[in-house]
């Protein structure tokens, strides 16, 4: 088995500040969490931005520029910028920061889908900001839009024109077939780094059988030309990432995906989750990849060829 690439998704756009006092929001907090995660063993840092005053998900390149240079100066980790942003953002908004930064790597959701966050609202009684409750509750009528035309645009503008490689986020079996379609069109080339995503309402459920089946179909569609990683929401994070590691895959953790470090215990930092999955991976007999090794495995262009 190859070495395990640990990705850490530092803040995301799903969780809101009222869910955890430890969710990083400001540029300083995002920087500290990201650098700590890299020091704990994360080779890739998956990054979103937030408005530092309200904690609301932001697509503003100015908010990204508040932390990207700091993280790059402090660590050699691969900086992976979201092209998903938030389901409430337009495609132009979502692409503004990646287009400006020209990163080594971007995430790419491989299809449109329902993105239902509203059950989380029922678990919160004290709201820190006025935007949070309607943001969550209104997701019962929310579709994340990534049509084939959108995907082709992202692959062209960020991949072909700016040299980024992609973390292909697959929330459903159909997303694997969409990736195969774009590979057949010549818009993406091997090796493919595929992130299987479990536990988001609107996507695949966090069942071990789904992970086994996703790998079976990915093997059929991509043969030896791909690597897979796993992220799972909430309490399913560690069980499914552990399963991925035993199957030869890679892993993703971070406060974007789960706010907890143990049952009933909030994670204080992203580094806690990275350290936990690193210990598990190493106890399974696998080694953790460094950023240099991850770049070689994924065929990345190198941090010096970005505009961060």
Image (cartoon, grey):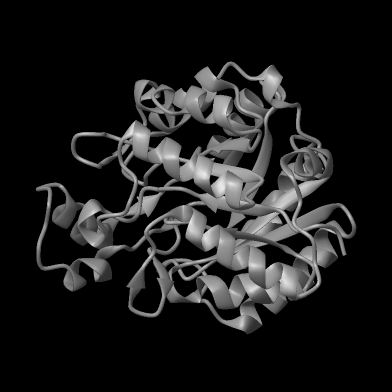
User: Depth check: 71 or 199 in front?
Assistant: 71
Residue depicted at 42% across the width and 55% down the height = 269
Is residue 214 visible in the rendered image? The answer is no
Is residue 165 visible in the rendered image? The answer is yes
User: Depth check: 177 or 191 in front?
Assistant: 191
Give percent across and percent down for residue 260: 39, 68
Location of the C terminus (image quadrant)? top right
Residue depicted at 54% across the width and 44% down the height = 46
Location of the N terminus (image quadrant)? bottom right
Where residue 185 sits, quadrant-wise, is: top right
Q: From the viewer's perspective, is 292 left or right of 148?
A: right
In this rendering, the answer to whether 299 lies above or below 42 is above
Where residue 127 sits, quadrant-wise, is: bottom left
Give percent across and percent down for residue 301: 76, 27
User: Depth check: 162 or 240 in front?
Assistant: 240
Give percent across and percent down for residue 277: 61, 66
In this rendering, the answer to whether 37 lies above or below 115 is above
Residue depicted at 64% across the width and 49% down the height = 168
Give percent across and percent down for residue 35: 52, 40
Q: From the viewer's perspective, is 118 left or right of 246?
A: left
In this rendering, the answer to whether 149 lies above or below 87 is above
């Amino acid at each position: 088995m190859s070495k395990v690439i640990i990705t850490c998704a530092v803040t995301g756009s799903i969780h809101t500040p009222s869910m955890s006092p430890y969710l990083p929001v400001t540029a300083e907090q995002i920087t500290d969490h990201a650098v700590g995660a890299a020091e704990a063993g994360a080779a890739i840092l998956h990054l979103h931005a937030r408005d530092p005053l309200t904690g609301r998900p932001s697509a503003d390149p100015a908010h990204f520029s508040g932390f990207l240079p700091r993280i790059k100066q402090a660590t050699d980790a691969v900086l992976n910028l979201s092209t998903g942003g938030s389901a409430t953002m337009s495609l132009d908004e979502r692409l503004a920061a990646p287009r400006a930064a020209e990163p080594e790597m971007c995430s790419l959701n491989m299809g449109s889908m329902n993105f239902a966050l509203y059950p989380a609202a029922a678990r919160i009684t004290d709201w820190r900001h006025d935007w949070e409750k309607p943001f969550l509750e209104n997701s019962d009528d929310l579709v994340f839009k990534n049509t084939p035309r959108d995907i082709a645009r992202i692959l062209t503008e960020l991949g072909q024109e700016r040299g980024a490689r992609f973390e292909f986020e697959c929330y459903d079996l159909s997303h694997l077939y969409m990736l195969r379609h774009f590979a057949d069109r010549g818009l993406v080339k091997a090796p493919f780094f595929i992130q299987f995503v479990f536990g988001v309402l609107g996507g695949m459920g966090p069942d071990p059988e789904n992970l086994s089946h996703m790998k079976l179909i990915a093997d059929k569609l991509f043969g030896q030309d791909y690597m897979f990683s796993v992220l799972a929401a909430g309490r399913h994070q560690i069980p499914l990432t552990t399963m991925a590691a035993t199957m030869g895959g890679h892993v993703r953790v971070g406060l974007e995906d789960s706010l907890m470090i143990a049952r009933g215990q909030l994670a204080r930092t992203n580094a806690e989750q990275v350290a936990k999955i690193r210990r598990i991976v190493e106890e399974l007999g696998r080694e953790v990849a460094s950023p240099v090794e991850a770049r070689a495995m994924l065929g990345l262009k190198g941090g010096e060829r970005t505009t961060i």
